[in-house]
Image (cartoon, grey):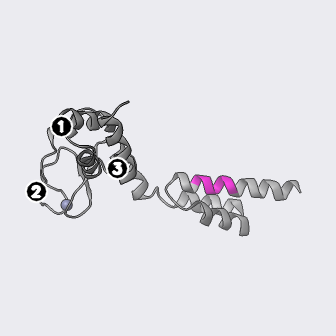
Amino acid sequence: MGVVLSWLVLSLVVGAIRSARGGSFWKLFFLSLLLSPVVGLICALAVPVSAKAAEAKQMATGDLRKCPQCAELVKREAKICRFCHSTLEPLPAESNAGGDNLSAAKNLAASGHSAAEISKELQKWRGLTSTEADALAKSAVDPS
Ligand SMILES: [Zn+2]
């Protein structure tokens, strides 16, 4: 019984490691369950951290933005995309000011943008989902 339990727990751990590295929790969980948590662990560590997870992290910190032409990530200050060499629109000063998303939203609200406009800007420049952007825009326009 103890062996089965630790097998299960180790499989869960392997799945968690994989999902922390941007992969599928369940795939590795079942792999560990069927073969062995040791095999699962090797697989979980062998696959590099997914580019998507790394991307999301960099976009969240506000260092990078998505090129509208080729959808590759470029530096926020970049004027030309380093992947497709298309000219990038300069970032609007107000949405660039302030480090975090909420202060960017507040700056936009202060300069007279509507919640819908702010939400659009946040999605475009900060890579937020529409749900996140809507919530931020709403709290920036009407803080009460
Ligand atoms: Zn590009």
Disc 1 versus disc 3: nearer the observer: 1
* Position of 31 relative to 6 (above/below): below
Left/right of residue 107 with respect to residue 59 in the rendered view: left
Q: Which residue is mark 3?
A: 128
Circles 1 and 3 in contact, beta carbons < 8 Å: no
Number of the label disc, if any, that sits on residue 95: none
Contact (CB < 8 A) between labels 2 and 3? no
Instruction: Estimate the x, y position of residue 17 in percent, counting from the top left.
Output: 59, 52
Residue 14 part of the magenta segment? yes
Task: Look at mark 2 in the image and give the residue it sits on.
Answer: 87
Can see residue 61? no
Q: Residue at x 74, y 53 (%)?
A: 9
Residue at (31% x, 42% y) in the render = 137
* Label 2 or label 3, whichever comes before in sequence order: 2
Q: Residue furthest bottom?
A: 34
Q: Amino acid at mark 1?
A: Gly
Q: Is residue 73 visible?
A: yes
Where residue 31 appears, as percent x and y from the top left, is 66, 67
- Residue 82 as seen in the image, left or right of residue 7: left
Q: Residues within 10 Å of mark 2 (few under 14, many from 20)?
A: some
Q: Main secondary structure of the magenta part?
A: helix
Q: CA distance from mark 1 to mark 3?
A: 21 Å
Q: Amino acid at mark 3?
A: Leu
Please give the residue where the numbered disc 1 appears in the rendered image. 112
Q: In the rendering, at what x and y percent does residue 13 appear?
A: 66, 52
Q: Residue at coordinates 26% horizontally, 51% vertically from top-left?
A: 120
